[in-house]
């Protein structure tokens, strides 16, 4: 972290989600943002380009700055974004719809265009008013969405207007969703209850498996604000919470959490691992912090160890096995999203700026 370089770029939009474009062989230089809480909300594609205005001394200047290459206006706030493949982006909105975007890379001007929009996936049963789509998860060509109506809908990226399955998962709003495997989903509701769902069966045949997120105060609830699984050990589920804690579950044993970690002092808006270096976890919080959690090299520092152990499953010992670094602090407004690719991290939030951190590894 000592060599990490942070650059701030103001874009005049609150960022709900940010994602690097997938690249297999080299460091990605393109990312997409989805905005929220603006008069007009957009999905934009950005490309890092050489800074033509570096001063002679080079003081406080950066070599590359992001330039907006193209944009698509959305009908409502963007609530979630994930890439289905190298050029197809799934975007959910607060109006209860899902869109597919195609991002075309080019030497000069990249382009993004909407190629499909679903019907209304989420609505409140009594009023028949649209319900916000709160999160989405991707596995292969399948896209699952969760909503404030308590339902999970599964569609195929090949035809998002055809709903493959609707699961009435809960009687209250779902806030977070993630795939554990092609057949299994985890959805979390407003009260901090996580439900294991089978993506293959209808509502009536769903397994009755629910677990409750722990809370500092036994008389209060603690909702799950973000979910992620370990990239190489899918049985390890990490839950970021409203109170800023991280709860780790070993899905092979749901009797009690494997670890419970005090982290931020505010809700964790996003949590996720580095895709290439699974020894690193990142969290973004409502108070404007982005932290990097790194496995202690003395422990082994490799999630694919032969014995299969992970420091995240170490209970009270986990803080001794994990180092924490503040990547971004003191912005005072919510950091809503981040993505990391190679040695570069991009973050965005309510400061109407994107932050690019080089040499994060």
Image: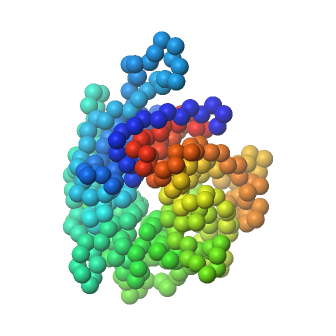
Asked whether residue 234 appears in the rendered view, the answer is no
Pick whichever, 16 or 135, lies toward us: 16
Q: Residue at x 56, y 60 (%)?
A: 266
Percent coordinates x, y for residue 133 in the rendering: 33, 66
Looking at this view, name the residue that lies furthest to the top.
56
Q: Is residue 140 above or below residue 35?
A: below
Q: Is residue 274 above or below residue 260?
A: above
Left or right relative to 315: residue 273: left
Percent coordinates x, y for residue 177 in the rendering: 44, 67
Left or right relative to 84: residue 345: right
Q: Is residue 358 above or below residue 214?
A: above
Q: Residue at x 48, y 25 (%)?
A: 62
Percent coordinates x, y for residue 6 in the rendering: 53, 34
Percent coordinates x, y for residue 25 in the rendering: 46, 35
Q: Residue at x 34, y 50 (%)?
A: 35
Looking at this view, name the residue that lies furthest to the front.
332
Left or right relative to 127: residue 202: right
Left or right relative to 149: residue 229: right
Q: Is residue 58 above or below residue 34?
A: above
Q: Residue at x 52, y 71 (%)?
A: 223
**Count the marks: how many?**
0
Q: Quadrant of the N terminus?
A: top right
Asked whether residue 52 appears in the rendered view, the answer is yes
Pick whichever, 213 or 199, lies toward us: 213
Pick whichever, 344 or 183, lies toward us: 344
Pick whichever, 103 or 51, lies toward us: 51
Q: Quadrant of the C terminus?
A: top right
- Where is residue 95, by image quadrant? bottom left
């Amino acid at each position: 972290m000592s060599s990490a370089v942070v650059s701030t770029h103001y874009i005049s939009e609150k960022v709900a989600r940010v994602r690097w474009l997938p690249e297999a062989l080299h460091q990605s230089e393109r990312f997409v943002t989805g905005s929220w809480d603006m008069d007009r909300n957009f999905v934009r594609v950005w490309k890092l380009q050489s800074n033509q205005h570096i001063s002679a001394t080079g003081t406080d200047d950066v070599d590359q700055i992001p330039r907006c290459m193209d944009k698509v206006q959305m009908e409502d706030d963007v609530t979630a974004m994930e890439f289905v493949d190298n050029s197809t982006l799934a975007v959910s909105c607060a109006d209860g719809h899902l869109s597919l975007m195609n991002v075309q890379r080019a030497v000069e001007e990249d382009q993004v265009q909407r190629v499909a929009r679903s019907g209304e996936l989420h609505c409140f049963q009594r009023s028949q008013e649209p319900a916000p789509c709160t999160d989405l998860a991707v596995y292969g060509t399948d896209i699952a969405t969760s909503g404030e109506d308590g339902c999970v809908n599964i569609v195929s990226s090949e035809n998002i207007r055809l709903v493959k399955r609707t699961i009435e998962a809960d009687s209250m709003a779902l806030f977070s969703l993630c795939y554990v495997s092609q057949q299994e989903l985890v959805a979390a509701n407003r009260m901090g209850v996580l439900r294991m769902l089978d993506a293959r069966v209808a509502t009536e045949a769903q397994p009755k498996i629910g677990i409750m997120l722990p809370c500092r105060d036994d008389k209060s609830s603690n909702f799950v604000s973000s979910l992620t699984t370990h990239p190489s050990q899918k049985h390890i589920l990490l839950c970021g919470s409203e109170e800023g804690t991280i709860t780790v579950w070993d899905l092979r044993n749901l009797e009690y959490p494997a670890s419970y970690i005090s982290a931020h002092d505010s809700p964790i808006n996003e949590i996720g691992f580095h895709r290439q270096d699974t020894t690193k976890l990142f969290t973004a919080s409502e108070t404007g912090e982005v932290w990097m959690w790194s496995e202690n090299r003395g422990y082994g520092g490799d999630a694919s160890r032969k014995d299969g152990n992970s420091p995240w499953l170490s209970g009270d010992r986990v803080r001794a096995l994990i180092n924490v670094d503040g990547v971004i602090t003191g912005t005072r407004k919510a950091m809503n999203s981040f993505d990391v690719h190679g040695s570069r991290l991009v973050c965005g939030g309510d400061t109407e700026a994107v932050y690019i951190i080089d040499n994060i590894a």
